[in-house]
Image: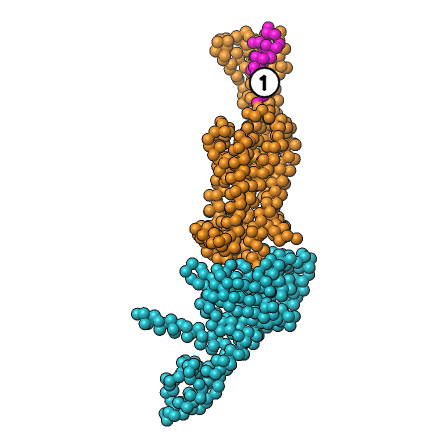
Chain colours: A cyan, B orange
Amino acid sequence: MNALSVANVTKAFGEMRAVDDLSFEVRPGEIFAMLGPNGAGKTTTLRMVLDILRPDSGQIEVLGSPISPAAKDRIGYLPEERGLYTNLSVVECLAYLGTLKGMKSRTARTRALELLGRVELAEHAHKKVRELSRGMQQKAQFVATILHNPDLVIVDEPFSGLDPVNTLLVKELMYELKQQGKTVIMSTHAMRQVEEMADRLLMIDQGRRVLYGPVEEIRRQYAAHAVYVHAEGEWASLPGIKRVAFDEREKASLVFLNEATSADDLLRSLVQQPSIHVRRFEMALPSLDDIFIEVVGNRESVISNDQDKAQ
Amino acid sequence: MKRYIVVARHELVTHSRRKSFLFMLIVFPLLMAGLSWLSGYVAVRQEEETGTLGQVGYVDLAGVLKPGLARPPEFQPYPDVASAATALTGGQIGAYFVLAADYLTSGRVDAYSHKAIPGGIENQFEEFIRANLLAGRTPEVAARLQEPANVTLATLDGRRTVNEESAMALILTPLLFALLLSLSIGMTSGYMMQNVVEEKETRMVEMMMTSIQPVELLWGKIIGLGALGLLQIGCWLAAALIIVSWRPDVRQMLEAISLPADLLALAVLYTLLGYVLYGSLLAGIGASSSSLQEAQSIAGIVTFVAIVPLLVLPTFLENPNGEWPTFLSLLPLTASTAMVIRLALGQVPAWQVALSVGLLGGSVAAVVWLAAWAFRVGLLLTGQRLPARAIFRRRIMERG
C-alpha cells in the first residue's frame, strides 16, 4: 500500500491548467521531495491531496483509500503560507489544532508542551503567538503539524525563514519521523536539503511531471551527460554541447551534453583540436540545482525559441 | 467530540475573554442602570419640588369654588388678590392662583409665584376646580365625568389584553423584541465576520481545512458565536430585570402584558433562523473579501436591511397586515424582525407565517451552502476578493 498515489490528476483554474495529467506515488516510510519552479503546481497538487481543492479529473488515494475525514486525521500539513492565531498563547493554539485532529484536549496540551520543549520553545509556550519571532512561529507551526502523531507528514517549504541552527533542528525531527516509519512529503526549493534527505523526488513544471524517481538514480542519469571541463581555447561551441555552466565549488565548467553525445565523444573532439588544451576532464555528478536549471531552463529556452519563430 | 463542537467551544471561550466583549458586557448594563437612575432621580426631584413650594393660595373671583367642599390641605383661600399678594411676599404661601371673574366662559386662571410652579401643583388645582364644578352630581356621574372611559386594549386576535396604564407596553413589546433581535444578529454576526477575516489574514484556515470540512467549520462558528451572543443578551436581560425591579412603575407596566407561548416560540424560531442567515451571510462575505475594511462596508449595508422593519415601524402600527409589513415579513432578510413585530401586534394569517418560515429556511440552507464554498476557496486567496459570479459558477461545477 502506498502512502499516497496520484493518478492522472488534472486541475484547471479557468483557462490555466495548474496540474496536468499528473501521476506519482509516495511509498510508506520514505522522505519524498516535490520540486518545481514557482507556479509549477506543487501547492495545488498538495491541496488536492488534502481535499482542500478537488481535482477536475483523476484519482487520489491517501494511505490506501480515497481521502476521508478519518484519513485527514492521519495527515499533518505545514502549509507554505504559515499562520497561527496571534491572539492565543502558543500552547492554547496548538492544543486547539490538536483537538481539531481528534485529540483529547488534555492529551493535545501535554504533547504540545513536550514537542515545544523538543524545538526549544518550552519557555515561550505560554506567550502569545504574536510575541514570537518569525522563526519561532515557524517551529511552533511545525509542532502543530506533527502534534497528532500523523502517519503522513506533508510540509511545504519547511526550511524557509529558518536559520541554520533551526534548519538542523527541523531536519532532525524529519529524520526522526522517518525512523518511526512515518512518510514525509516535502515541497521545497532547497535543493541541498533534497539531495541530503530525500529518498525519491518528483519534479513538476507547468503542472506536468518532468522528473520522477530515486534522487541518486536521477543524479546518475544526468551524470552520463555532464562533465567537468577545464580547458584553454575556444571549446564551448563544439558540437554536442548543450549548455555550459560554471561550478563555483569545483572551479570548473559543468558541461551538459546532448542526448546523442557521450562524454567520450566530447573528449575525442576536444583532443582533436590543436588549439584546445585540456587541463581537466571529469565525469560530473550534477547537483539537483544544476539538474533543476537544466530541466526547467531548457523549457524556457524552448519557449523563447518558439516565440522567436513565431515572430 | 464532533469537530463543530470543538470549533464552537473554542470560539465561545476565546471570544468571551476578549476585552471588547467584556467591555460591552459591563458597559451596556451600566449605561442602562445610569439612565434608569437618572429618570427616577428626575421624577423624585419633581415630587420634592412640589413639596418645597409649601402652601398655595387661591382667589376665586368667579365664585365657582364651593366653601363647603373638602379642599386639599395645601390650598389656602384668600378673599382678594391684594391679600394673596401680601401672603406671597410675606412668604406664607409659595404661589397663588386667581380664577378670573369670567372664568366660566373664558376658563382663565392666572398663577403668581416667585418660582416656577411644578406641574403637579397645577394638576392638583385643576382637579380641585373640577371637583367643585361637579358638586351636586351623583358620585357615579362625577366619577365618570372625571374619567369617561377606562379603555382596555386588545390585539386583533383578542389573545392579549392591556389596560390603559400599560398601553405603551403594547407598542413597546414588539419594538423591544425586534430591537433585541436585530441587536443580537448585528453583534454576533459582526463577531463572525471579524473572526473569519482574521482567520483568512492569519492564514490559519488552510491548516483548519485539513482537519475539518468547511461546512462543519461554518456551523461550529455559527453555534459558538451564537452562544456568545446569547450569553451577552442573557447577561443584559438579567441586568435589565434587576434594574427594572428598582422601578415599580416599569415593573407594573411589564407585568400587565401577557405573551402567549406560541408567540414566544415563533419569536425564538425567527431569532434562530435570522441569526443563522445573517451569521453565515457575513461569514461568507468575510471569506470572500480582501480585507476587514471591505468586508465591513458590505456588511454595513446587509445589516442595515435587518433594521428596515424598525425604521418603518409606524407602518406596522397603523396596519400590521398592510402591504409593506406583509412584504417585509416574507422577505428573508427582514422576515425575522418584521414577522415578530406583526405577530406581537396581532393575528397574522397562518399561511403567511408558514410561507415566511419556509422562505427564510430555504434562504438559510442556500446561504450556508454558498458560505461553506466561499470558505473553501475564498479563504485560500489571501488579499483577494472572490467575485460573486465565481462563487455561483464554481460551486455548481463542483457539485456537478
Image coordinates of residue B54 in percent, x first then y, are: 61, 19
Residue displayed at 62% across by 62% down: A74
Furthest residue in direction top, as rendered: B136
Image coordinates of residue B176 in percent, x first then y, are: 56, 34
Residue carrying label 1: B150
Return the residue nearer the eye: B57 or A6.
A6
Residue displayed at 43% across by 51% down: B389
Image coordinates of residue A96 in percent, x first then y, are: 63, 56
How many labels were placed on the picture? 1
Reply yes or no: does residue A309 show up in magenta.
no
- Does B214 appear above or below A191? above
Residue stretch rendered in magenta on the structure = B125-153
- Does A145 appear above or below B298? below
In the image, what residue type sits under mark 1? Asn
Q: Quadrant of residue B69?
A: top right
Return the residue nearer the eye: A300 or B71.
A300
Residue displayed at 61% across by 32% down: B262
Q: Quadrant of residue B139?
A: top right
Residue displayed at 61% across by 70% down: A28
Task: Report if residue B83 is visible in the image.
Answer: no
- Does B133 appear above or below A225? above
Image coordinates of residue B178 in percent, x first then y, are: 55, 35
